[in-house]
Image (cartoon, rainbow, N blue to C red):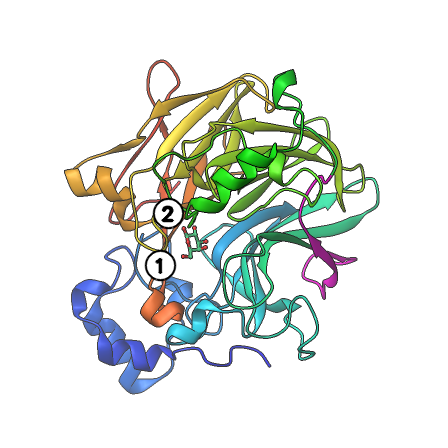
């Protein structure tokens, strides 16, 4: 069923002060007047991005696509993201992956649920699981649309699996294929020889004593966890996908209890991993990867690891997607809060604006774990210094 558990616009109007409406959109009094007389389609007025404000689809329902990503295909953008419901229950997947489409990135048409969670409690993607940060890419070779996502089977973050689903048509329905840990039996390309062996018994004992909870830990063993997981496959939580100009696709994800990012190449059909992968920034605890390519260089936005709470973003650069990667520091400019909390948001994707040279949009989530459906979208223009370093500044409203 489409749009169930959504707040209606009327609910939101009752809850929000006038200042909550985007200035570039329509005045509050005009909105109230329209509310009293007839149904007004907010989106028809929208000509700007209004970070953190409510954003409506063609049915006047707030867009529900969190931790999202974008695919441009045959003249349309497709936004895929986590469909959330009200309250704490919304932090678990109750519905699935929602898809919207647009020709201009301002006006969004609801395309429904592209991948539904399963009613079968035995399914990996059973209703109530944790299914986060879905991303979709198009495989020109097979003419299929491939969706990858972070999956936790059940309601805690211990399984750290990757799920994959496939569709013949961009909006779905997507058919769930499997979920698993990644690249079992393959060593990372950039690990020195002495690390290419499973853990010794004393290392296993050391690891057992640590409380690895997904955030920085004193004595974090920067070169042990991928060896522990050599046989069973690597952990993967926050993630994104990237298709390079040569058609090769990559999965970039937080691994090793979130302490290390991995860049792993996908197979030619994008449905599995091909065993070629590297570890980057060991011990730096990057999450929320969002990558783009400009003038032959790869740039990666990411966050630190503080759960739903925002922290300071990071931006990194590389000449080759498999590294060497170099951290460039915090890309945010503005007040201390803007810099320390990334405008109270966490990256999820970078959108290249098609047909506009060097125009990229930083796409982030302002999470609201107490009322998950009311998480907001923070989209900001990526600006560049004279030396090409990307940076971000707050804008109340803006257009590309
Ligand atoms: C965040 C992560 C989200 C979600 C959350 C759960 O750090 O980026 O996708 O997993 O933690 O606490």
Left or right position of 254 against 346:
right
Dot 1 alpha-carbon crowd within 10 angstroms: few under 14, some 14 to 19, many 20 or more: many
Question: Could you say where residue 97 lies in the image, as x and y percent from the top left?
Answer: 58, 64
Pointer 2 with pointer 1, Cβ within 8 A: yes
Question: Could you say where residue 54 lies in the image, as x and y percent from the top left?
Answer: 33, 64
* Position of 375 relative to 2 (above/below): above
Left or right position of 270 against 374:
right
Magenta segment includes 308: no
Query: Residue at 56% across / 28% down in the picture?
Result: 279
Residue 352 seen in the current view:
no
Quadrant containing ligand 1 reads bottom left
Helix, strand or loop under label 2:
strand
Query: Residue at 60% across / 36% down in the picture?
Result: 201
Residue nearest the observer in this picture, 127 or 180: 180
* Position of 243 relative to 367 (above/below): above
Q: Which residue position holds label 1?
A: 367
Beta carbon at label 2 within 8 Å of ligand 1: yes
* Position of 339 relative to 9 (above/below): above
Helix, strand or loop under label 1:
loop
Q: What span is in magenta?
A: 164-184
Q: Which residue position holds label 2?
A: 346
Beta carbon at label 1 within 8 Å of ligand 1: yes
Residue nearest the observer in this picture, 398 or 334: 334
- The residue sitting at the top extreme is 387
Quarter of the image for residue 338 reads top left
Mark 2 or 1, nearer chain start:
2
Left or right position of 391 against 106:
left
Question: Could you say where residue 114 lies in the image, as x and y percent from the top left?
Answer: 65, 65
Residue 126, label in figure: none
Locate the C terminus by quadrant.
Answer: top left
Query: Residue at 50% across / 50% down in the picture?
Result: 104
């Amino acid at each position: 069923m489409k749009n169930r558990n959504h707040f209606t616009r009327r609910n939101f109007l009752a809850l929000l002060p006038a200042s909550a409406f985007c200035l570039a959109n329509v005045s509050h009094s005009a909105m109230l007047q329209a509310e009293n007389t007839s149904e007004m389609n907010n989106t028809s007025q929208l000509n700007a991005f209004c970070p953190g404000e409510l954003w409506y689809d063609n049915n006047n329902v707030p867009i529900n696509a969190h931790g999202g990503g974008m695919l441009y295909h045959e003249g349309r953008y497709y936004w895929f993201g986590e469909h959330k419901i009200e309250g704490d229950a919304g932090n678990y997947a109750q519905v699935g992956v929602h898809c919207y489409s647009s020709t201009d990135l301002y006006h969004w048409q609801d395309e429904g649920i592209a991948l539904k969670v399963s009613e079968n409690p035995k399914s990996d993607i059973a209703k109530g699981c944790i299914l986060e940060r879905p991303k979709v890419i198009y495989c020109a070779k097979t003419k299929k649309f491939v969706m990858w996502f972070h999956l936790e089977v059940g309601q805690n973050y211990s399984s750290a699996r990757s799920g994959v689903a496939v569709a013949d048509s961009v909006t779905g329905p997507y058919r769930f294929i499997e979920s698993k840990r990644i690249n079992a039996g393959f060593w990372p390309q950039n690990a020195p020889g002495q690390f290419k062996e499973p853990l010794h018994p004393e290392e296993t004992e050391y690891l057992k004593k640590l409380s690895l909870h997904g955030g920085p830990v004193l004595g974090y063993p920067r070169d042990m966890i991928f060896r522990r997981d050599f046989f069973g496959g690597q952990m993967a939580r926050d993630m994104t996908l990237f298709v390079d100009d040569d058609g090769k696709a990559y999965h970039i994800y937080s691994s090793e209890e979130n302490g290390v990012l991995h860049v792993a190449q996908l197979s030619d059909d994008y449905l599995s991993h091909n065993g070629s992968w590297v570890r980057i920034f060991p011990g730096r605890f990057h999450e929320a990867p969002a990558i783009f390519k400009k003038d032959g260089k790869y740039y990666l936005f990411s966050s630190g690891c503080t759960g739903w709470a925002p922290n300071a973003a990071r931006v990194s650069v590389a000449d080759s997607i498999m590294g060497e990667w170099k951290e460039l520091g915090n890309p945010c400019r503005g007040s201390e809060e803007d810099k320390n909390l990334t405008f109270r948001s966490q990256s999820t994707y970078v959108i290249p604006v098609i047909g506009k040279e060097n125009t990229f949009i930083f796409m982030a989530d302002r999470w609201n774990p107490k009322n998950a459906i009311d998480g907001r979208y923070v989209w900001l223009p990526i600006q560049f210094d004279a030396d090409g370093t990307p940076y971000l500044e707050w804008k109340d409203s803006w257009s590309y």
